[in-house]
Amino acid sequence: MKKTLNINIGNSIIHIEEDAYEMLTIYLNEVKQHFAKSADDFEIVTDIENRIAEMFGEMLNNQQKQVINIQDVQSVIAQMGSVKDFESSEEDETEEYIAPPQFSVKKLYRDTDQAMIAGVCSGLAHYLDVESRLVRLIAIATIFLGGSGILAYVVLWIMIPRAVTKAEKMTMRGEEANLRGFANSYLQPLVHHSRGFIAEFLDVLGNFINGTGKVIFKIIAAGIIAFGGIAILSLIVILAALLGIWDSNIYQMFPLSIINQEYITVSVFAAFVVCVIPVLALVLFSIRVAFNSRPMNKSLSFGLLIIWLAGVAVTTFYVVKIGSEFKEGAEFTQVNDVKAFQTYTLNIDRTRFFTKEDSLRYSIDPGNYNGRRILTDLDHNFDAPRNIRLNIEKSENGKVSLSQYYKARGKTFEVALKNAQNIHYDFLQHDSLLTFSPMLQFAKTGNWRGQEVDLTLKVPVGTKLNISKDFSRYLDGYGYWDCNHDSNSEFTAWKMTDAGIKCEHEETENNGE
């Protein structure tokens, strides 16, 4: 059993055995004595201690242990070099400065000391052992290749870390991080590089972010946490609603009517995972920023990533599967003869058509509804999109007719045709009054597969039409509201001419001129 100590070296708390601590203390005292005659002794010793602290941290992480022993200290001293070896090598050298030796191991860092913008080019120059001017010229040339150079620079800016410590800067230049390397790094002549306005601006911006900017970021992070929490709660409420906890008929509403009944549970859960995990990750990151907490556990992070990817895969599978049911289209036409009148009135019939399934679903007793009508709410109808369009054209044979084009889509042509045949649409004529249903109904329960009805009303030249203002949303290709000259009237007046249907008010004004 050995006695252990906690020491502070390089601003890091290290747990070390007593005999290892004694050896390390002797080594550092020798280092301090040797560099005491140097003007930069404090900086050199500080850099050496920081490097030793980094090496201890790497040992603890790599070996999965908590205490530094004497073998670890011996290994560090061997890598850094002893003071005696360093002094003996100094005696063989001249007083003239000799460039530090290069060794094979280099790491790519951004050199912000010689940066024009972010130090990417100067860092690459060190790594490739070329002039930084050459790298900058190449970077400028790539800007003219569709702007790819700018994108590449931004990506490298994000991916390449900045050389902060003395050891990182030495590794960036290919210098060995030992006693000789640290000493030589301070013997190099002091050279001032013109970094340019952008680099100086980025320095000022960085200082702002480290100071006042942190407060702003924390405020923003707090806002993200609040809104993210509300978003997560909302997603949970939506999930509960979609699973039919509060409303079992919710899937009869558009666009949820697109989803097949057998896909509902799995697809809804998958979509929930896809939406909620990014919001949760953003909230956790904001908590870390706002409260300086530890980063999320790696196992938890990878677990959430795997769950999210699984959700994306499942959601994509069902989106493609449902999308395949819109592959083919089918259409059939039904032509109805209309009794001829000089003037017609076009109106909306809000009476709702009910199938046997609807009667059972809504518990409709014919006896209780004798003499009553159930109306559709036009302003709050979510059963289907606006899928009825009316065209009014000139009749070439002098007869009045209404053509109904029933359209739908399906996985095959046969399925698409069945979906089109399942459409129920109401049109009635009572003398000169033509009433149209505002929505499609399905004769049998089914999913929405692009069902729509195109209506074409053909009337002879000279025929007048009074069109209800409720009909405006169904007219296709007419400046309906340009004809709204009487705001007190429920109808607008139109007339069929050789050039097509025209607003009767405009025709009267043109004839008067």
Image (cartoon, grey):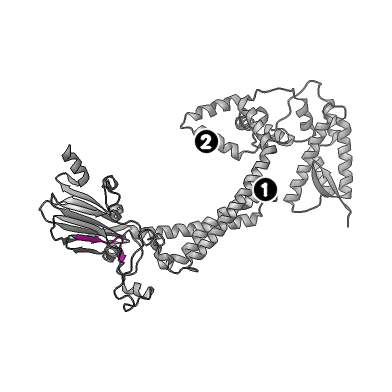
Task: Give the residue pinned by disc 1.
Answer: 290
Report the Cα–Cα distance between label 1 and label 2: 30 Å
Instruction: Tell me the magenta residue range.
Output: 433-441
Residue sticking out furthest to the left: 397
Amino acid type at mark 2: Leu
Horizontally, is 450 left or right of 505 in the view?
A: right
Q: Is 272 in front, or is 391?
A: 391
- Rendered residue at 64%/49% (across/down): 222
On the image, which quarter does residue 371 sit in?
bottom left
Residue sticking out furthest to the bottom: 367
Above or below — where is 5 with respect to 28? below
Earlier residue among tags 1 and 2: 2
Q: Is 297 in front, or is 438?
A: 438
Q: Secondary structure at mark 2?
A: helix
On the image, which quarter does residue 364 sit in?
bottom left
**Rendered location of residue 272, percent (x, y):** 51, 59
Q: Secondary structure at mark 1?
A: helix
**Rendered location of residue 427, percent (x, y):** 23, 63
Is disc 1 surrounded by few (<14), some (14 to 19) or many (20+) residues within 10 Å?
some
Q: Is 19 in front, or is 426?
A: 426
Task: Give the residue pinned by disc 2.
Answer: 151
Quadrant of image for the N terminus = bottom right
Above or below — where is 446 with respect to 30? below
Q: Are marks 1 and 2 in contact (CB under 8 Å)?
A: no
Query: Of circles 1 and 2, which is in front?
Result: 1
Q: Is residue 438 magenta?
A: yes
- Residue 55 marker: none
Horizontally, is 240 left or right of 385 in the view?
A: right
Q: Is residue 365 magenta?
A: no
